[in-house]
Amino acid sequence: YLAPLNPEQRLAVEHGVGNPAPGERGPLLVIAGAGSGKTSTLAYRVAHMVASGVDPDRILLLTFSRRAAAEMERRAGQFLARGLDIASGGRRTPTLRWTGTFHSVGARILREYADRIGIATNFTIHDRGDAEDLMALARQDLKVEFAGRRFPSAAACVAIYSRVVNSEAALPDVLRDAYPWCAAWEGALRQLFAAYVAAKRTMEPRRVSGWSVTT
């Protein structure tokens, strides 16, 4: 079932599977351009691992888009069915539980362990559009005095807020290094971000001190 692969693809598929030589163990980084068969190679690798005895629940298959994740899972299932028919006499094709986008799998893990980390299992996640809409409402309620100056748009405010949260940097530092044109609005932005967080918390199923799921 690996016959369609070229030599380089086959090396990537078989790396570390079974009883590898010492030099074939550990992580493998594959750099490949467009049209080189990346998706098929990954799908074949998953199929080969399972056909070789690897527990499907110990395989994590991630990608960036839902479309790519669905395509990778579909192909892996096809190749796996072929591989199992050849390698083990037609065993039932197992389910790949940990396949999806980085975000979907991350959300699934958070829900699975929510009680252990002190958040509600029915939490909601704001995507970028939701965050910008809520920021726009908070910005409107803030009634900032513009005084002829252009206040940052809701999208810019979300970008600044995300940079502050994700980098764990102080707002003045973020404004100085990445958004110098917004530095004059530091005080208003600080008020806006506090109002934005308060608005998010009113939507939380259960408020937990010290936790905020942020995009």
Image (tube, rainbow, N blue to C red):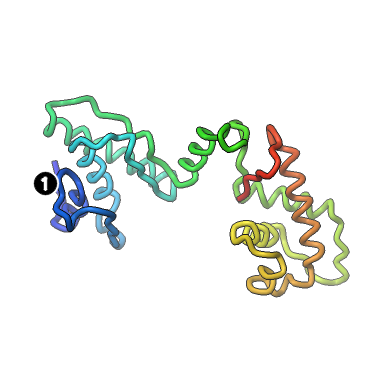
Q: Residue at x 44, y 45 (%)?
A: 101
Which residue is tagged 1? 3
From this view, report whether residue 50 is shown above or below residue 136. above
Q: Is residue 133 left or right of residue 118?
A: right
Q: Is residue 160 left or right of residue 71?
A: right
Q: Residue at x 20, y 35 (%)?
A: 53
Residue 214, given in percent of the width and then of the height, sits at: 63, 49
Specify the quadrant of the image occupied by residue 211.
Answer: top right
Q: Residue at x 75, y 50 (%)?
A: 196
From this view, report whether residue 189 is shown above or below residue 181. above
Within 10 Å of disc 1 (Cα), the crowding (few <14, some 14-19, many 20+) is few
Query: How many marks overall?
Result: 1
Which residue occupies the foreground of this view, 62 or 174?
A: 174
From this view, report whether residue 174 is shown above or below residue 135. below
Which residue occupies the foreground of this view, 117 or 132?
A: 117
Q: Is residue 93 left or right of residue 131?
A: left
Q: Secondary structure at mark 1?
A: loop
Q: Residue at x 85, y 61 (%)?
A: 144
Quadrant of the drawing holding the N terminus: top left
Q: Amino acid at mark 1?
A: Ala
Residue 187, given in percent of the width and then of the height, sits at: 81, 65
Residue 45, given in percent of the width and then of the height, sits at: 23, 46
Specify the quadrant of the image occupied by residue 171.
Answer: bottom right
Residue 181, given in percent of the width and then of the height, sits at: 71, 74
From this view, report whether residue 141 is shown above or below residue 203. below
